[in-house]
Amino acid sequence: MARNVSTRRKLLTTAAAWTIGILIFFPILWTFLTSFKTEAQAIASPPAFLFFDWTVQNYFEVQSRSDYFKHFMNSVVISFGSTLLGLMIAVPSAWAMAFAPTKRTKDVLMWMLSTKMMPPVGVLVPLYLMFRNTGLLDTRVGLVLVLMLINLPIIIWMLYTYFKEIPGEILEAARMDGASLAKEIIYVLTPMAIPGIASTFLLNIILAWNEAFWTLNLSAARAAPLTAFIASYSSPEGLFYAKLSAASTMAIAPILILGWFSQKQLVRGLTFGAVK
Amino acid sequence: MGSITLKNVSKVFGAHAVIPSIDLDINDGEFVVFVGPSGCGKSTLLRLIAGLEDVSGGEVVIDGKNATELPPAKRGLSMVFQSYALYPHMSVRGNIAFPLKMAGEDKSVIDKKVQDAARVLNLTDYLERKPRQLSGGQRQRVAIGRAIVRQPDAFLFDEPLSNLDAALRVNMWLEISQLHQQLKTTMIYVTHDQVEAMTMADKIVVLNRGRIEQVGSPLELYHRPDNLFVAGFIGSPKMNFVSGAPAAAYHAHTIGIRPEHLVLSKDHGTWRGTVGVAEHLGSDTFLHVKADGIDTMTARVSGDFPVTHGDQVFLTPDAQRVHRFDEKGMAIR
């Protein structure tokens, strides 16, 4: 039976939820609005909320000054590349740990997670030198590799959790039916784990797309993704809020749209197995 | 051909020997049931035969060939699991066709075999459905269909009916028995339910703590149990055991009398007792009688025997059918 909730209580919680929602969303909205202002309007005090001279000039300037599409393509290649490569490694690893665990499996999982607890800056210098010496600095391949590696523990953990939900008997049935290990993974395990794999995929695209520390430090011009594109607008010569906002809007728009369309899948994947 | 021989087969998990050592011969075409209480190692034994678990020692011989090191798919066996283990993302057709697809059969051959199996199992109308759209009994039939299309040397059933309700289970006993008569293929069936074992088996293997207690036909086990464990496990309701003076009169440490071998009378008999609970099943009545000087005894009488709770009755064992056991629990013959 549903609980009885008084109208007063309902109003209060609704108002609270909206307040929190708007607080979280406001910076993005403000960035979006600022991107249509002139630089003077952008720093005007008191600020104009909606009543100003709307202009798309910033977008043209940003595109002409620093080729947006080049950075966009770099972001696409780096985030999809690192996620796909990560999945190729993580699916068999998670399979092994979920279905053929040993005494040390839990320790291995903890160890992998522990690498996420280390501050990245701690390994920046050695990694930078390794990248310099191997010619990986400012290359897409280099960034794909490093983002794959930093997100791999999360991918493996997520897949491991999904795989654990799949009954072992079904895989044994496949083995009895004559499936080799590869066929068992391709025909039985993967189709059953699609919701889990899809949400892992989406979450990691988002993580990789937004990753700024490594992409800023290990790229300069050729392989620079959208994070570097935004950062280039906060320059020593002074801040250009309107242009910075236009650049930010362009950088986050694709991932926001992707997230919007896949939110059902994301929520389903993230709560997978929480309720039977 | 599907003869299976286990030679000294053992299975050890860590320091615990689930199966210390087992020797067993299963002839081609036999319907063999492994029965025993939970944790007796019957499912493990089946999984060792299937190849889903590696043996710790000994040999699994299938059709005269040593199959100990062969992977499950190469042993020529099919298995039906307790949870059905259907592939949820495939249709019934996809599920039944899967083993044939794995074997690389032609599409036309696969289609024909799937149709044949579906006809035998009354699944023709459901071929395009997904497992979640089927009832428990239909799912179980799909699992059986998936097992029979490969025409294996032997079928392995791991408690396949325990998720079904009682009425459906009885139906499936009949269907599986008919299937066995039709296919004449070796079947090994694991269950903890001795009634199920008695109903279907040509040969029953009674297991306890990883050891074989006795192997025999259902009636052999019923009439000539080798020991107290088998005597108590086979038969429903359970055999009554009496030790002490009444047993000594039969020159035994313990005697066993089945409920149906106790003669009941209102006025005379060997043991006097009071009726505790009377279970009226219609055709039969099971009486739980607290007999003077001995424990509670279960007696089976005809359904029209007039008796209720608290009545005084006399029990007399049928002397010809008293089972005698020594102090180690072994049968005295």
Image: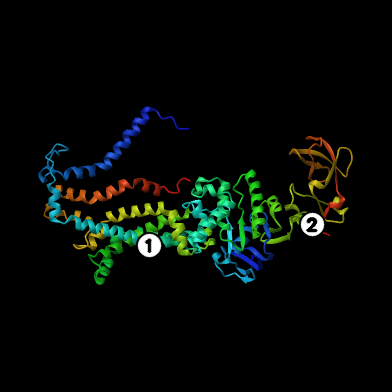
B180 vs B198, nearest the viewer: B180
Q: Position of residue A75 (x, y in %)?
A: 25, 57
Q: Is residue A168 visible?
A: no
A240 vs A262, nearest the viewer: A262
Above or below for A208 versus B163: below
Q: Secondary structure at mark 2?
A: loop
Q: Position of residue B153 (x, y in %)?
A: 61, 63
Q: Amino acid at mark 2?
A: Arg
The residue sitting at 27% across, 65% down in the picture is: A142
Q: Position of residue B1 (x, y in %)?
A: 64, 66
Chain bearing tag 2 is B
Residue A215 relative to residue B261: left or right: left
For the residues bearing labels 2 and 1, Cβ distance under 8 angstroms: no
The residue sitting at 19% across, 53% down in the picture is: A230
The residue sitting at 64% across, 47% down in the picture is: B169
Mark 2, Cα crowd under 10 Å, few <14 / some 14-19 / many 20+, is some
Q: How is the image coloured?
A: rainbow
Mark 1, Cα crowd under 10 Å, few <14 / some 14-19 / many 20+, is few
A207 vs A174, nearest the viewer: A174
The picture quadrant where one finds residue A14 is top left
Above or below for A27 versus B39: above
B118 vs B235, nearest the viewer: B118
The CA distance from mark 2 to mark 1 is 61 Å
Q: Which residue is mark 1?
A: A88
Q: Is residue B260 visible?
A: yes
Q: Amino acid at mark 1?
A: Met
Chain bearing tag 1 is A
Residue A168 relative to residue A127: left or right: right
Q: Which residue is mark 2?
A: B224
Residue that lies at the very extreme toward the right in this rendered image: B268
Q: Secondary structure at mark 1?
A: helix
